[in-house]
Amino acid sequence: MSSINTPKNFPLCRSLRALLSAAVGKVRDRGEEGASQAVMVLVLVPVFLFAMGVLLVDMGQKNSAQSQATGAAQSVARIATAAGAADYGNVDRGRMISEGNAALSSLGMTGSISIDDASGTVTVRACKSAPTKFASLVGVREVQGCSEARASMYTLGNDGQKIKLS
């Protein structure tokens, strides 16, 4: 027999199937009226609880991951911009990308950093994964939240005015 996890092989599905079979057997033996409603409730309540768990808990995990990714993307965009524009108007792309990647990994994020030389804009995309609790019962092991942030490179001239670096 194959060891691939299909919905029939999940422990929760096996136990629910066993409970449902036992309940249907009792209903058939007794011949009671209204028993079909009891079986329907027996089937729908676990499905409803599972759906609420996925919506409330697992989507909460996704929202939390996305919020953390947003904060990280904003911070890393500022860090990369500051690292690249530190040399009085000279833009060091290599330093920007290496410092940005170091900041992303120290925050436990994955992502990318891109620099648009024409506009002097640094764009950071950060992603964070979070494990699921309920959706893992049907094979979805994690959810991911991603966000993007941009920062523009400026420096101050001798007269105190902002000068856009590009």
Image (cartoon, rainbow, N blue to C red):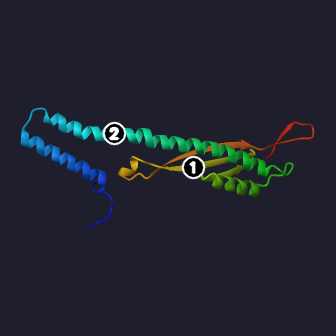
Q: Which residue is mark 1?
A: 127
Give the image location of residue 129, x and y in percent. Answer: 52, 50
Identify the image quadrant of the N terminus: bottom left
**Residue sticking out furthest to the bottom:** 1
Could you tell me which residue is drawn at 73 percent across and 50 percent down? 80
Residue beneath the point at 44% across and 41% down: 57
Q: Residue at x 71, y 43 (%)?
A: 151
Residue 16 image point, x, y percent: 25, 48
Asked whether disc 1 touches disc 2, contact meaning CB atoms under 8 Å apart, the reply is: no
Mark toward the start of the polypeptide (1 vs 2): 2
Of all residues shown, which one is farthest toward the top? 34
Above or below, 19 relative to 159:
below
Tell me where residue 115 appears, x and y as whole percent: 71, 50
Q: Write down the quadrant of residue 45 in the picture.
A: top left
Foreground of the two, 160 or 61:
61
How far apart are the alpha carbons under marks 1 and 2? 29 Å
Q: Nearer the viewer, mark 1 or mark 2?
A: 2
Q: Disc 2 marks which residue? A: 49
Question: Which residue appears at 13% of the width and 32% of the height?
Answer: 34
- Residue type (three-letter) at the residue carrying disc 1: Cys
> Residue 41's quadrant in the figure?
top left
Q: Nearer the viewer, residue 96 or 5?
A: 5
Left or right: residue 31 compared with residue 2: left
Could you say which quadrant of the image residue 39 lies in?
Answer: top left
Q: Amino acid at mark 2?
A: Leu
- Left of 48 or right of it: where is 33? left
* Dot 2: element: helix
| Crowd band around label 1 with a 10 angstrom C-alpha radius: few (<14), some (14–19), many (20+) | many
| Residue situated in front as seen by the camera: 41 or 148 | 41
